[in-house]
Image (cartoon, rainbow, N blue to C red):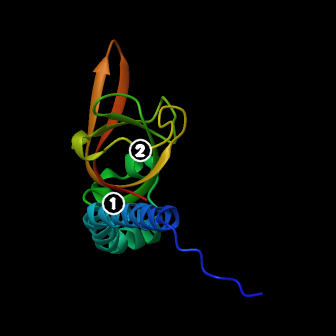
Amino acid sequence: MRNRLNISPKNILLLLAGGALAAAVLGSALLLAARLWPSFQARTAKREATAVMVKEAKALGLTYETVVAAPAQAMGKPALWCLRRSGADEALYKGQEKNRLRITNPAAMYNYSGSSHQACVDTVVTIQNITASEYLGARGLRLEVTFVDYY
């Protein structure tokens, strides 16, 4: 007994519907990839551009305490710090309330996925300035840094 290929309108319709569905899924995937590709390239280029700065920051090993102790030597230098956002233009070094920083370009410090208000995020910053203030006999220092990128 020979098996014969059953060609019926129902089978042809199912084959065409399956092909159309596969083409739609593949087309959607390609459109999504084409839309995401420029963002991926831009992020990769930014990471490559900051790689030298990250290497320098690791070599310098600047901490909040070393910058406060010798601010003149740290100005304009990069640092790799764990920061927690605490306001529109404010961040906390290692999440500690006593070590406040002012971010000079807060718009560039886009929201990090995850809970940035509960934990600090490794960031690359450039030390810009240190300001001292005094109120009722209490003296406070605040560093000003420029956000470069998340690490």
User: For mark 2, what is the residue?
Assistant: 112
**Residues packed near mark 2 inside 10 Å, few (<14), some (14 to 19) or many (20 plus):** few
Q: Report the number of numbered marks.
A: 2
Query: Horizontal and vertical percent for residue 86?
Result: 40, 29
Q: Are marks 1 and 2 in contact (CB under 8 Å)?
A: no
- Picture quarter containing residue 26? bottom left
Lateral position of residue 1 relative to residue 47, left or right: right
User: In the rendered image, which quarter contains the N terminus?
Assistant: bottom right
As displayed, is residue 87 above or below residue 125?
A: above
Q: Position of residue 12 (x, y in %)?
A: 46, 68
Question: Foreground residue, 38 or 13?
Answer: 13
Furthest residue toward right: 1
The residue located at (45%, 62%) in the rendering is 13
Percent x, y for residue 72? 28, 55
Drawn side of residue 36 relative to residue 16, left or right: left
Residue shown at 49% from the left, 62% from the top: 14
- For badge 1, the amino acid type reads Leu
The spot of residue 139 in percent (x, y) is 36, 25
- Which mark is first along the chain, 2 or 1? 1
Instruction: Classify 47 as above or below 69.
Output: below
Under mark 2, the amino acid is Tyr
Query: Which of 11 and 102 lies nearest the eye of the viewer?
Result: 11
Alpha carbons under labels 1 and 2: distance apart: 22 Å
Q: Circle 1 sits on which residue?
A: 32
Secondary element type, mark 1: helix
